[in-house]
Image: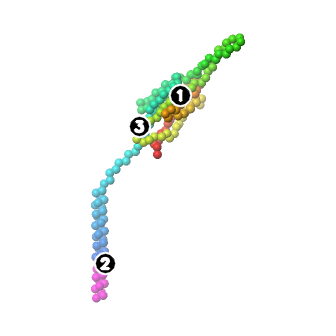
């Protein structure tokens, strides 16, 4: 009798074990079927910068400003001449008229716009110029950048490169 109870108990454990394996297999097959029918459609795009000069002006004689077709390159050309003013000196014996030469001073304004999908901010600036040329940068009216040029008579070259990046 004891042996019969032990066989029944062993037989019940085996059936329970087989039922658990079958149930686990069924759950796995069901999950695999459900998972293969799921689809996730997504699209990821990045922003872009489209920085360009949207305005410029000069209030100096002798400076001509032009932009390339994409409005990303500003070319500033001109003849830099010293200005001459007459100095009149009166003495008892004579009137002496002399010329006083002063260095050229001029300026131009520009503004930057961004037509891209990401907001742009100035990340850096690279200025290459002749040693005897003085360039001063200021912020003018309406956040327009202003470059003031001071130089004696001669030929000068300068290049200002503005590097932009997206705002974090």
Q: Nearer the viewer, residue 18 or 90?
A: 90
Give the farthest residue toward the bottom: 1
Question: Magenta segment, which residues?
Answer: 1-12
Q: Is label 2 in a helix, a strand or a loop?
A: helix
Q: Nearer the viewer, mark 1 or mark 2?
A: 1
Name the side, left or right, on which 37 lies relative to 112. left
- Report the residue marked by disc 3: 115
Q: Is residue 68 left or right of residue 15?
A: right
Q: Earlier in the sequence, mark 1 or mark 3?
A: 1
Residue denoted by label 1: 107
Residue at x-position 58% and y-position 21%: 83
Residue 142: percent from left, percent from top: 49, 33
- Across and down, in percent, residue 30 comes to 28, 63
Was residue 5 drawn as part of the magenta stretch in this picture? yes
Q: Earlier in the sequence, mark 1 or mark 2?
A: 2
**In front: 95, or 72?**
95
- Between the C-alphas of marks 3 and 2, the distance is 74 Å
Residue 101 spot, x, y in % from top left: 61, 21
Q: Is residue 106 above or below residue 161?
A: above
Looking at the image, residue 33 lies above or below residue 51: below
At horizontal 30% and vertical 86% (from top left) the residue drawn is: 3
Does the magenta portion include 57?
no
Which of discs 3 and 2 lies nearer the camera? The answer is 3
> Looking at the image, is 58 positioned above or below residue 51?
above
The residue shown at (60%, 19%) is 84
Residue 148 placement (x, y as % from top left): 55, 29
Residue hosting label 2 = 13
């Amino acid at each position: 009798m004891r042996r019969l109870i032990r066989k029944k108990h062993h037989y019940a454990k085996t059936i329970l074990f087989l039922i658990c394996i079958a149930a686990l297999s069924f759950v796995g097959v069901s999950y695999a079927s459900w998972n293969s029918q799921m689809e996730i459609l997504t699209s990821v795009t990045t922003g872009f910068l489209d920085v360009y000069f949207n305005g410029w002006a000069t209030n100096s004689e002798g400076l001509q400003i032009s932009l390339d077709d994409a409005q990303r390159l500003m070319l500033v050309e001109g003849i830099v001449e010293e200005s001459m003013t007459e100095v009149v000196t009166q003495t008892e014996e004579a009137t002496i008229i002399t010329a006083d030469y002063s260095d050229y001073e001029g300026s131009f304004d520009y503004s930057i716009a961004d037509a891209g999908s990401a907001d742009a901010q100035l990340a850096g600036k690279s200025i290459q110029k002749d040693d005897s040329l003085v360039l001063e940068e200021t912020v003018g009216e309406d956040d327009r950048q202003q470059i003031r040029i001071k130089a004696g008579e001669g030929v000068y070259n300068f290049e200002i490169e503005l590097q932009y990046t997206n705002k974090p």
